[in-house]
Image (cartoon, helix red, strand yellow):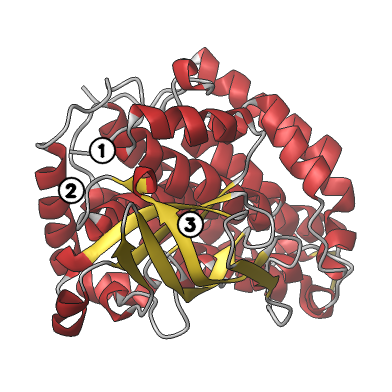
């Protein structure tokens, strides 16, 4: 029986993250956003102390051992403060750590997953390239086998934590003939360390939103990666990438839900303070309608990510449900942010109020982890293909217990 009631553990986490965000991050987020400043020590240090960086990693690997609902709760609360915080959860905890947990060898888990879960090392994810986003098979990065290692050459772009992360999950072509044929079985996943010779990175300075976060690019010029750093098996890179994106979409869905709530709360506060035609603007029908739409979207988006999290916890297939949750929540967050700016009038166009930042930030989640309109038009095909690949991979290895996040099959 489906039960979306949050446990005391979930509620405690919700309160803890909410209080930390309001106390340690919210007072500084406006200036950090304005100055394009990523406050690494305050944010990553605080998240590590709360156990968020290893939230769904089992305790035996240095994590908090919490379930997928906890991951969703944390993502929602973090994005309520600012999208840049949730991005860390998506990339570090979702895309990277959960992939290592599911596909990594015991040696890889000890060397990389444990310090990442403890927060002493930060993790990134390298899939997108200048000419390849949703079209994963269009990537150009190659990894050529030379003795007991691979030599990787290529460039990744729009990478969250590009200038911050210590380790990256990188997908590259290991079979050049299959690359010509665009056969995804020629892709392989690797764990690449920033310290490997030939690795370089830089920031993207012309972003429109999520200005308090770190986004950039990295290049690999003859980077030598040992065989021991192949994640999964050679040729399983596409499967691993799709699995990772499912984890990322789940955190995006929960995070966008938090952004809707932030827009609603800011709008309600302003509608009670601002007066027009002798009354609070919240008394006008059109303003009421916009706020009501925000509340409706918030409740629906929350139920969708809760359903996805419940399916993940019980080990059931949920690629379709997770994609739907991400699509709905990100589109609804754009609508909420746009309406919030309208409710604030000219003030919504200034940096004095947070809704302008909400509007700039909401555009990124709907454009990443498969763009919203792309997901909408291609969802049946994408989901069935992803489920097949992940189910096949899962049949080849022993998965974790439902209490530990694992493949959703």
- Residue 241 in the image: x percent, y percent? 32, 57
Q: Residue under circle 2?
A: 390
Answer yes or no: is residue 290 visible: yes
State yes or no: discs 1 and 2 in contact (Cβ < 8 Å): yes
Between marks 3 and 2 in the image, the one whose residue lies nearer the viewer: 3
Under circle 3, the secondary element is strand
* Residue found at x 51% / y 41%: 93
Question: Looking at this view, is 286 or 330 the one in front?
Answer: 330
Under circle 1, the secondary element is loop
Q: Residue under circle 1?
A: 407
Q: Residue under circle 3?
A: 125
Specify which label sits upstream in the sequence, 3 or 2. 3
- Residue 265 in the image: x percent, y percent? 70, 50
Image quarter for residue 1?
top left
Q: Is 405 placed left or right of 314 in the picture? A: right
State yes or no: discs 3 and 2 in contact (Cβ < 8 Å): no
Under circle 2, the secondary element is helix
Q: CA distance from mark 1 to mark 3?
A: 18 Å
Q: Is residue 138 above or below residue 331?
A: below
- Residue 392 in the image: x percent, y percent? 9, 46
Image quarter for residue 402?
top left
* Residue found at x 57% / y 35%: 116
Q: CA distance from mark 3 to mark 2?
A: 19 Å
Label 2 crowd (10 A; few <14 / some 14-19 / many >=20):
many
**What is the number of callouts on the image?**
3
Question: Looking at this view, is 276 or 112 the one in front?
Answer: 112
């Amino acid at each position: 029986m489906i039960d979306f009631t949050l446990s005391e553990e979930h509620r405690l986490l919700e309160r803890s993250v909410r209080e930390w965000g309001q106390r340690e991050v919210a007072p500084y987020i406006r200036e950090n956003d304005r100055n394009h400043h990523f406050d690494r020590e305050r944010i990553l240090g605080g998240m590590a102390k709360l156990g968020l960086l290893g939230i769904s990693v089992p305790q035996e690997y240095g994590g908090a051992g919490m379930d997928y609902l906890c991951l969703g709760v944390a993502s929602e609360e973090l994005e309520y403060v600012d999208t840049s915080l949730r991005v860390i959860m998506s990339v570090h905890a979702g895309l990277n750590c959960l992939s290592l947990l599911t596909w990594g060898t015991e040696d890889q888990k000890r060397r990389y997953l444990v310090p990442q879960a403890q927060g002493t090392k930060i993790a990134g994810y390298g899939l997108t390239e200048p000419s390849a986003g949703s079209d994963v098979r269009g990537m150009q990065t190659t990894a050529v086998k030379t003795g007991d290692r691979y030599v990787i050459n290529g460039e990744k772009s729009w990478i969250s934590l590009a200038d911050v992360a210590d380790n990256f999950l990188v997908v590259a072509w290991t079979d050049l003939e299959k690359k010509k044929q665009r056969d995804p079985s020629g892709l392989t996943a690797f764990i690449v360390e920033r310290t490997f010779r030939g690795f370089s990175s830089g920031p993207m300075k012309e972003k429109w939103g999520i200005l308090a976060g770190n986004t950039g690019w990295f290049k690999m010029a003859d980077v030598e990666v040992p065989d021991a750093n192949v994640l999964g098996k050679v040729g399983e890179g596409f499967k691993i990438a799709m699995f990772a994106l499912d984890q990322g979409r789940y955190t995006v869905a929960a995070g966008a839900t938090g952004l809707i709530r932030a827009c609603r709360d800011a709008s309600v506060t302003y509608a009670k303070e601002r007066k027009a035609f002798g009354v609070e603007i919240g008394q006008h029908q059109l303003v009421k309608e916009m706020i009501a739409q925000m509340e409706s979207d918030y409740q629906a988006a929350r139920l969708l990510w809760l359903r996805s999290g419940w399916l993940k916890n019980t080990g059931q297939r949920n690629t379709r449900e997770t994609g739907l949750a991400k699509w709905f929540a990100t589109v609804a967050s754009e609508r909420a942010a746009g309406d919030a700016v309208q409710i604030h009038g000219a003030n919504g166009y200034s940096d004095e109020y947070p809704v302008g930042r909400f509007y700039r930030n909401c555009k990124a989640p709907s454009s990443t982890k498969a763009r919203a309109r792309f997901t909408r038009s291609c969802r049946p095909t994408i989901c069935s293909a992803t489920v097949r690949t992940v189910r096949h991979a899962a049949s080849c290895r022993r998965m974790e217990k439902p209490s530990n996040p694992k493949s959703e099959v």
